[in-house]
Amino acid sequence: MIEEPLIESARIIRNKFNSLNETLVKYESDVKKLATYFFKISDDLKNIESGLSKNDTLESIKDKVILKLNDLEMESNKVCDKINKVNIELEKLKKEELDLYKVIKKRYPLLSDDAIKLEIQNKINI
């Protein structure tokens, strides 16, 4: 009943969503690596005290700590940037989906939301 171009639009949105979802799953390992790196940096910060010599100044100690924290921040930003890009794309898809829904409701005002959903799902899964 719903026109094929509208079904095709829904199919494209679903495929993009699946692709973005797969990308997020891949980034899961990056997040795990970041957590491991965080614990390593935490251990390194704890060990700074044991590695101090009498020649170390407060300034040199501060520099060591800041260097470790900067490394952690850079790694964290890399992962956040990747995830933020996916989130932006997901928001765009959400808008596309809503726009498509509005077009379908306008063209087929007598169809219930459930009927629209069922027909699209049936035709996409063919």
Image (tube, rainbow, N blue to C red):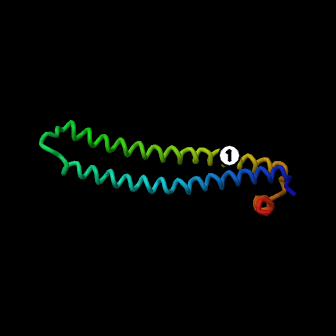
Q: Residues within 10 Å of mark 1 (few under 14, many from 20)?
A: few
Of 33 and 5, nearer the camera is 33
Residue extending farthest left? 54
Q: Which quadrant of the figure contains the N terminus? A: bottom right
52, above or below 33, in the image: above
Instruction: Name which residue lies at 21% across and 36% down.
Output: 59
Of 18 and 91, nearer the camera is 18
Number of marks drawn: 1
Instruction: Name which residue lies at 66% across and 53% down.
Output: 17
**Looking at the picture, how far across and down is residue 120, in whole percent?**
78, 58
Q: Report whether 79 appears left or right of 73.
A: right
Q: Quadrant of residue 65?
A: top left
Given the image, on which type of amino acid does mark 1 rest? Lys
Q: Quadrant of residue 122?
A: bottom right
**Looking at the picture, how far across and down is residue 66, in whole percent?**
30, 40
Q: Which quadrant of the figure contains the C terminus? A: bottom right
**Looking at the picture, how far across and down is residue 34, in whole percent?**
42, 52
Q: Report whether 28 appears left or right of 100.
A: left
- Disc 1 marks which residue? 95
Q: Say which element carries label 1.
A: helix
Of 75 and 106, nearer the camera is 75
Q: Report whether 109 appears left or right of 85.
A: right
**Looking at the picture, how far across and down is residue 35, in whole percent?**
41, 55
Instruction: Name which residue lies at 60% across and 56% down.
Output: 22
Instruction: Name which residue lies at 76% across and 48% down.
Output: 100
